[in-house]
């Protein structure tokens, strides 16, 4: 069983990115639910959430509702706008209506390829909360900052700006994902100590800006080439409350193993 003593429920979040159509999504969710049911996964001990592309969400909702599958789901992005003439955008109210529990905001791929700024990320976090969804706010340094040794300051500045306008109570309930850009999709994982250094620094920053209760309850995930062979060691760190998993979340056996990290050896 999960041996976390922080009182924060670990969260394993699978970010599918731009992969799998709605039919493939249904197959993957069914297989994941069966695999975890087989092992009698306790979803209240380790929460499981998936992030399909927008076009899959309605099908995922229908399946999860019909079969009462205790897997949560969310979107990979959301508009900063409520509604109106914003071609191509998808609103928070639309996602809430589809039963999304979470929204990923500020993923490094959106920051890098679509020019998302911290200010936009803060607006997205705010609008997700307004519509009853939990934002997963992503931050993380690039290779340059890591080489300069400025990674911690870079990430805590990003956290400060990306949470701008949220109250301490709101911050207590959100999720932050620390994803060093150099470790995403590269097979390079930060060592558990590297990841813990930044996750602990982020928690410290939350304490300074929002107070102890918010710092104690905010969940901080690590992301970047998380696999069954490295998740258990990452999860032994006191400030790492789960993982944001990209590539491995597309493989049912790998993602199910990650969700059950406490059965895996610490390598
Ligand atoms: P990865 O992606 O696990 O494929 O490195 C993580 C992410 O981008 O969230």
Image (cartoon, rainbow, N blue to C red):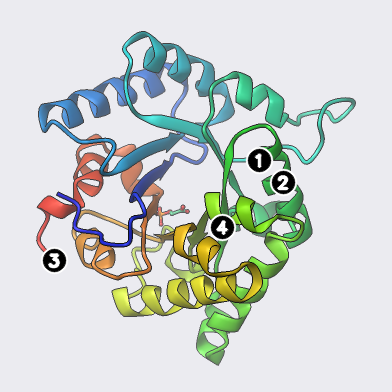
Instruction: Please tell me which residue is depicted at 25% across the width and 59% down the height of the picture.
Output: 4
Residues packed near mark 2 inside 10 Å, few (<14), some (14 to 19) or many (20 plus): many
Cα separation, mark 2 vs mark 4, equals 14 Å
- Residue 141 shows in this picture: no
> On residue 129, which mark appears?
1
Q: Is residue 114 left or right of residue 150?
A: right
Quarter where residue 108 is shown: bottom right
Instruction: Please tell me which residue is depicted at 31% across the width and 12% down the height of the picture.
Output: 67
> On residue 138, which mark appears?
4
Quarter where residue 156 is shown: bottom right
User: For the residue labelled by badge 2, is the local secondary structure a helix, a strand or a loop?
Assistant: helix
Q: Given contact means CB atoms under 8 Å apart, are the residues at marks 1 and 2 in contact?
A: yes
Residues packed near mark 4 inside 10 Å, few (<14), some (14 to 19) or many (20 plus): many
Q: Given contact means CB atoms under 8 Å apart, are the residues at marks 1 and 3 in contact?
A: no
Q: Position of residue 169 (x, y in %)?
A: 62, 53
- First in residue order: circle 4 vs circle 3: 4
Cα separation, mark 4 vs mark 3, equals 26 Å
User: For the residue labelled by badge 4, is the local secondary structure a helix, a strand or a loop?
Assistant: strand
Q: Position of residue 9 (x, y in %)?
A: 34, 49
Question: Where 221 sits versus 257, above or below?
Answer: below
Q: Is residue 63 left or right of residue 114?
A: left
Residue at the spot of label 3: 266
Q: Is ligand 1 closer than 8 angstroms to the Cβ of mark 3?
A: no
Cα separation, mark 1 vs mark 3, equals 36 Å
- First in residue order: circle 2 vs circle 4: 2
Q: Is ligand 1 closer than 8 angstroms to the Cβ of mark 4?
A: yes
Cα separation, mark 1 vs mark 2, equals 5 Å
Residue at the spot of label 2: 126
Question: Where 49 sits versus 217, above or below?
Answer: above
């Amino acid at each position: 069983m999960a041996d976390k003593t922080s009182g924060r429920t670990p969260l394993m979040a699978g970010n599918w990115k731009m992969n799998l159509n709605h039919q493939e999504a249904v197959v993957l969710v069914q297989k994941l639910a069966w695999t975890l049911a087989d092992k009698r996964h306790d979803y209240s001990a380790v929460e499981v959430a998936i992030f399909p592309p927008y076009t899959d969400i309605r099908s995922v909702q229908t399946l999860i509702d019909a079969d009462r599958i205790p897997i949560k789901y969310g979107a990979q992005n959301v508009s900063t706008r409520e509604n109106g003439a914003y071609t191509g955008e998808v609103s928070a109210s639309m996602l809430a209506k589809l039963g999304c529990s979470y929204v990923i905001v500020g993923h490094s791929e959106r920051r890098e390829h679509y020019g998302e700024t911290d200010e936009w990320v803060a607006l997205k976090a705010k609008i997700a909360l307004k519509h009853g969804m939990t934002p997963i706010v992503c931050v993380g340094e690039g290779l340059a900052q890591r080489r300069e040794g400025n990674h911690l300051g870079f990430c805590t500045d990003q956290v400060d700006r990306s949470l701008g306008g949220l109250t301490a109570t709101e911050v207590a309930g959100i999720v932050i994902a620390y994803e060093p850009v150099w470790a995403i999709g590269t097979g390079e994982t930060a060592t558990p100590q590297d990841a813990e250094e930044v996750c602990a620094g982020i928690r410290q920053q939350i304490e300074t800006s929002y107070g102890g209760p918010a710092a104690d309850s905010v969940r901080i995930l690590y992301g970047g080439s998380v696999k069954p062979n490295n998740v258990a060691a990452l999860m032994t760190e006191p400030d790492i409350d789960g993982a944001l998993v990209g590539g491995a979340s597309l493989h049912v056996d790998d993602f199910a193993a990650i969700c059950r990290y406490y059965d895996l050896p610490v390598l």
